[in-house]
Amino acid sequence: MNENPARRPLPDTRNAGAAYWRSAAEGRLCVPRCERCARTFWYPRRQCPHCGSGEVAWLQARGTGRVYTYTVVRQSGDPFFKGRLPFVVAMIELDEGPRLMSNVIDCDVESVEIGMAVVVSFEQAQDGLAIPLFRPARPPAKT
């Protein structure tokens, strides 16, 4: 048994994305939303990329969406990810509109497909952080 398991690399929680990581630690998936043009967007920033307004607030997303595109990672030099091979890195299109990158978990990597419905789940990480990951919204059909 490994006495020192590999630790997950942690995200940069500073600047415009700080609210995203705080909400994830509370088990909530939030995305930036412009108060002027009412559009959501991703990546977090202080100004709306659509209209330029600085009136940006955080909207709690439903946590549901679809796999927009993905890849299966079969090799990694990072000790944490090496222990999780193979795994899926996917661009998830949230029902609210923006697309964000995450992992699809709790399913066989060969069962993931574009358009697959997914729901958010949070993996606890060190330093009080939680990482938003996505799992299939319904179990894969048995063949």
Image (cartoon, rainbow, N blue to C red):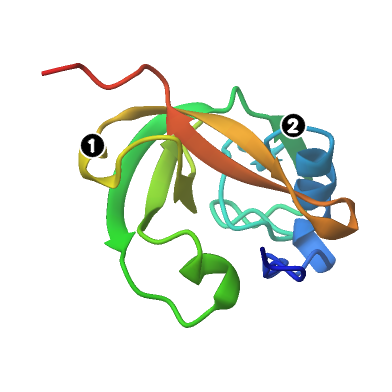
In the image, taking residue 68 as reference, residue 79 lies left or right, namely right
In the image, taking residue 105 as reference, residue 70 lies left or right, namely left
N-term-proximal mark, 2 vs 1 = 2
Where's residue 25, x and y in %?
A: 82, 42
Q: Residue furthest right?
A: 127
Residue at left offset 33%, top offset 39%: 67
Q: Nearer the viewer, residue 139 or 119?
A: 139
In the image, taking residue 102 as reference, residue 85 lies left or right, namely left
Where's residue 94, x and y in %?
A: 47, 34
Residue at left offset 30%, top offset 53%: 70
- Other-residue count near label 2 (Cα within 10 Å), few / some / many at <14 / 14–19 / ≥20: many
In the image, taking residue 80 as reference, residue 73 lies left or right, namely left
- Where is the C terminus found, in terms of image quarters? top left
Q: Nearer the viewer, residue 50 or 68?
A: 68
Q: Residue furthest bottom?
A: 77
Q: Are marks 2 and 1 in contact (CB under 8 Å)?
A: no
**Which of the labelled discs sits on residue 28, or is there none?**
2
Could you tell me which secondary element the residue under label 2 belongs to? loop
Position of 88 relative to 140 (above/below)? below
Where's residue 69, x and y in %?
A: 28, 50
Could you tell me which secondary element the residue under label 1 belongs to? helix
Give the residue type at disc 2.
Answer: Arg
Residue at left offset 59%, top offset 51%: 51
Position of 137 relative to 48 (above/below)? above
- Where is the N terminus found, in terms of image quarters? bottom right
Q: Which residue is mark 1?
A: 111
